[in-house]
Amino acid sequence: MSCECSTNGHMDNVPLPDDPNNTWNTNLDLFQQKFYDDMSALEWKCVYLSNDDNPNGPSNEIVEDIYESGSPAMSKATGSDQVISMLSSPTISSQPINEFNDDTYIVQAFPCLFPKGNGNFKTNKNNMGSALNYFKHLMRYEDDRFAQHNTFRYFALNSYMRWSALKNGSLFIKTQPDLERMTLTELKEELARNPSLIRKIMYRNSSISGSKAYWFARGKELLNMVEQIGLPTLFCTFSAADLHWPELFNQLAPDEDFESMSTYRKRQLVKNNLMIVDTFFLKRVEIFMEEVLTKKYKIKDYWFRIGYQRRGSPRMHGVLWMENAPDVTGMEHKSAQGLQKIVEYFSDLVTAFHPNLDQPPSVVHPCQKKLIDIHNLDEDLAEILNRVQRHTICSKQYCIRQSKKDKTMKCRFKFPQDYQEEAKLTFDEQQNVEFLPKRNDERLNKYNQYMIQTLRANMDIAPVISKKALINYLAKYISKSEIKSDHLAELMKIISEASGDNKTTKYAVQRLYIKACAERDFSAQETCHLLMGLKLYSSGGRDFITINFNDNNDWRLLKNDDSALSLMEKYQCRCEALDAKHGKSLVIAKITKLLSDYLDPQSFLLLGPTGVSAININGSTIHSKLLIKTNGTDFAHLNGQQLHAFKKSMANVKFIIIDEFSMVGCEMMHMVDQRLRQGKDQPNEEFGGLFLYMFGDINQLPPVMDCPLYSTNQKSMATIAGKILYDNIDTAFILDNIHRQNDPQFQKILNNISSGNITPDDYKILKTRFTTEVDAAERKRFEDAPHFFPTNKEKDDFNYQILSENIDPITKSRKPVAKIPAKISTKSKNFTMCDQDTLECTLYLSKGSRVILRSNLWVERGLVNGSVGDIVDIIYHPDATPQEDPPSVLICKFDSYKGPYLNPDLKTIPIGPLQLSHQNDNSEKYTVSQFPLCLNYGCTIYKSQRLTMEKILVQAVAHERLRNGTLQRNRTDVGESTIMGLWALFNKDTFRSIGLNYESGRKNIHNQYMILVNALCGIGHKYIKWPNERQRQQTELFYRRNFGFPGVAGVIDGTLIPITAPSEQKQRYVDKNHDYSINVMIVCNHKRLIIDIYTGQPGSVHDSRVFRRSPLARALFSRDDLLGPNQHLIGDGGYMCTKKMLVPYRNDGNITPSHTWYNFKLSQCRATIERTNALLKSRMARTQKLFCKNIVRTNKHIAASAVLHNFILLRGEEQDGIVLEGEPPEINVQDAILAGQEEGHRRRQQIRLQLAEEQE
């Protein structure tokens, strides 16, 4: 069995199913807009799955007919005995059913819910974790029979909580060996000596959501937040106006008019859809907190919980921490001026002042209004206060309670309250402080104007002015679970009752846990909330970890593990990564100087993962100094003379310093460790017992073909060993001052990019430096700037382009280019080079070419992999032919070289061919001889590390991805991905079969297809436009000349696009052919160009209703520039005749020849739209049936097909016309159609008579 609940995010302007408005007005308040989008995208998916190996296959879905009875088929009874035998109920056994031995008891207990007897749940001890998923699935079942059953939801919650209590009790005893060995008598004696033990026992049960132990633990967490970040600023409570929010009923009954809905109907909808109502409130509150309050009041943190009123409706209790809030600690010692500042601050947030005590009640309940529809905020505030904030009646059933002090009957909310002309702080005899807001209504509850008018529901709010007030609030709202229970007395009672039955301690604890689950009543909505596993509280994104401070017990985990750090010790010793540009090179230089002065220059090794990083610290590469081959898979231990020489070189070394350690992977870390153990002859010491210093920013360049040190996905023993070595480094030093970058904004962007948390604001700032955004003068300034590319191919293409354009300043002609092929020696006839060759197969150079060194020739003198220089001359052997033979030597000049020169004046050195031996994938050995150079007008980002330049030009394209912890190139280029997407759009082939053609995976093909679909939707406004006046006249002239029908500006019709059963509300998508489909409204012109398309409506919706719901209908009846005075659309009989659209006459028995002729001419015009629809489906073969359960994605498929249809007809040229930007004004389309019917009938009759005359 499988269940899933997902949210698709925003709908990206794709019309929603059966939504007459399609999308909200773009001028809506941010809160209302985001909330509506998220709730509209809520998707409930629920299917039964069999136990097949492939749970994702379509054959695993079992469609259950809920109307089929579970009783045996009834046959005609011939006698009373037969009737009795057929209808008699089974006898009730005296022996209760064991729920852990009988898998069918749930199905048997609810035959009306399981009519076919399917859906058993195996309630064994190994299956408790999936119980919640089982009940989740049933509660989401498509016909809602489980969620609406009055008994089943309580049975499910009871079962789940009991099973969880049993599991918690068993786990607690297993982790407490002392208790496990106790008898019940010993446990009773221990509890008498140590009553606090009961808190330890009950803490384990805090994992059961909604229990008293659960809320007690949450209250402790909130107090911990207060200890860390100080007192919060405000208490607040928000209730649900669940009978008055129109957005809620748009979800419950989208086909019904909310304004005409009776109160009884609303109550029934809420009662029958408790799960949706509860989820709606939770989503509304979350968005209200995150998108409204947090931004309005600069809330830096918050905590809230979901509670339930006596009538079962949800509400939210919470506390808010605001920036710049005054300090309210030590109020009794503050000056009068300080107290006044606190009063002024809270007066802006909390008040009890009524703006108009004489405000008459509104006709429409104020909670039903949208904020954008309100023009007088003061009048609206008075109306909503009168409806939801006044405590008008006090009664014994609700609020009248007996006072503990004087035994009098009083309102527990202290109403009525005294008037207050101004807000103030008061102190009682115990110096307890209370804030009294400004008040002119003795029965008005406190409120915040912005909050109550935005949320549109009852609320409560109060300032936090003391820690005592916070603790009282915790006891009243946060930790409140309800009825107080004496757990110690309960456990003593259980022990006494079980003492003579040879019961165990485990039995007593489990019984206590089960009793704790039944301490209070649960409302129907809370039951749904708990069964759905929805969160009951939010701590503002914080996570809490409970640390055990009990005495440590010695455990021997592995053979060489004698002790382990506790969680707190690990936290205190955690490493923090250094950021870039903090002056690490200066620190390295200082360390090496101290070591040289106090020890000797041979006491340390300076290492870098690349030649560039090594030369920047005057060191060596890891590979060269530690004798590690560049091909990491060939790592082997040294032996013989080589090992002896290496040990000798390491004799005086005590420190290892590695720079740019982000490029050191897990496998390289392991190899460094193994080599150092060999060098120091210390096989059991990490890194041979040497001191290891690693410098760098781990968020910078990752290693190539190796797992980064931060990766948790290691595939081999070597990478696992390297990861363990890195995790064992427990000391870090942070360099806080950034020396090379003084722009704080740019520093923040760099840090966000490195951590993968780039924001839209960061992108906007970077976008200002795009070549398309800067002016021509700025682009010219960067013409000579170094170019950096993400891939070698892009770098090579750029280099060859620059090389081909090099001009000799003397001859004014292009410089000759030398073609230098590599010399390859091999005996194989079918030879292929391996991918790891660093030498070029063919090298193209000319005098003056900018080059980069590809190998470490002399690291100590600066000739390292990545050194940049120029070609001064190309020398050939006297007997050589330059067109055929390679040169003998290249005369070069390198910027970083610090050794002897061939020509000291020109600072030139000779570079000869380098000979390397390799083995390819076919195990064929070969030798390559080639100059270790390549062009460097542009270089890769890897080669740019540690370079400081005044200006650069970066080709920023995503060509890399992290897969299985290893950085890999994304080799699918734009052209290839476009072809893949087009093939998928034009053909009905499965993505798997397409992948076989392109040697790519199914998922990659689907990703490329969706990229193309989204791209086409993004440019849809360029190719699907409403015709302008000139274009409409051309269409009108075409139909007039060819068919004699005047005034035709376009032809409209609906077409059904078959789909698979959608994941939600599937019965609404069943069309007249009993298939699942989407009804797509298309308008085209005489050239079969689509001039408007509206998709998203279910196949069961009639064409005329689709038109009424479309943005085009609202635009046509609200704008005069879309159709001329005598122009109209042509539709079939499914539409209503109006001045904007003409339709054929219906054959009601009174039809005349002129009516028939009119219908014939109109059908000739309508043939265009039929051909357009057929052409669209034949070209875009995938639209013949879309195998997609996600309606939003399906709509994008259809829209992309329409865009591509026009793109082909227009040959890629952008279409002229009118772009229908924004949302048309909200009008009643039905009323507009009815108002224009008379004009439409008159126009149709006029054309009929005109056509009849022309026929004669």
Image (spheres, helix red, strand yellow):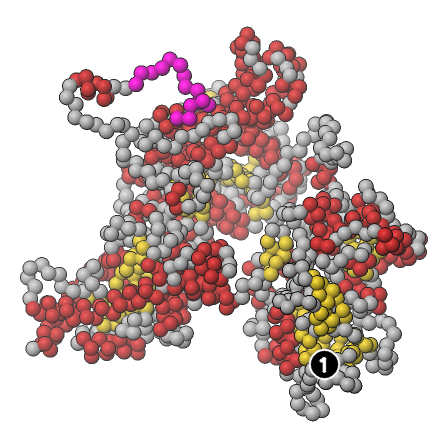
Foreground pick, 368 / 553? 553
| 265 on left or right of 331 | left
User: Residue 184, position in %: x, y?
Assistant: 60, 12
Q: Residues within 10 Å of mark 1 (few under 14, many from 20)?
A: some
x and y percent of residue 634 in the render? 73, 55
Horizontal side of 625 relative to 413 (left or right) equals right
Viewer-nearest residue: 1112 or 473? 1112
Which residue lies at the image location 93% right of the left edge and 53% below the top edge?
598
Picture quarter with the C terminus: bottom left
Residue assigned mark 1: 885
Rendered image quadrant of residue 683: top right
* Magenta segment, prevailing SS (helix, strand or loop): loop
Left or right of 901? Residue 61 is left
Assess whether residue 102 is covered by the magenta stretch. yes
Q: Residue furthest bottom?
A: 811
Q: Position of residue 291 (x, y in %)?
A: 50, 50
Q: Is residue 1068 magenta?
A: no
Question: In this picture, is 235 found above or below 324?
Answer: above
Residue 728, above or below 100: below
For the residue pair 366 and 628, the one nearer the viewer reads as 628
Residue 863 location, quadrant: bottom right
Image vertical order of residue 1144 relative to residue 433, above or below: below
Residue extent of the magenta highlight: 90-104
Amino acid type for the residue under numbered disc 1 = Asp
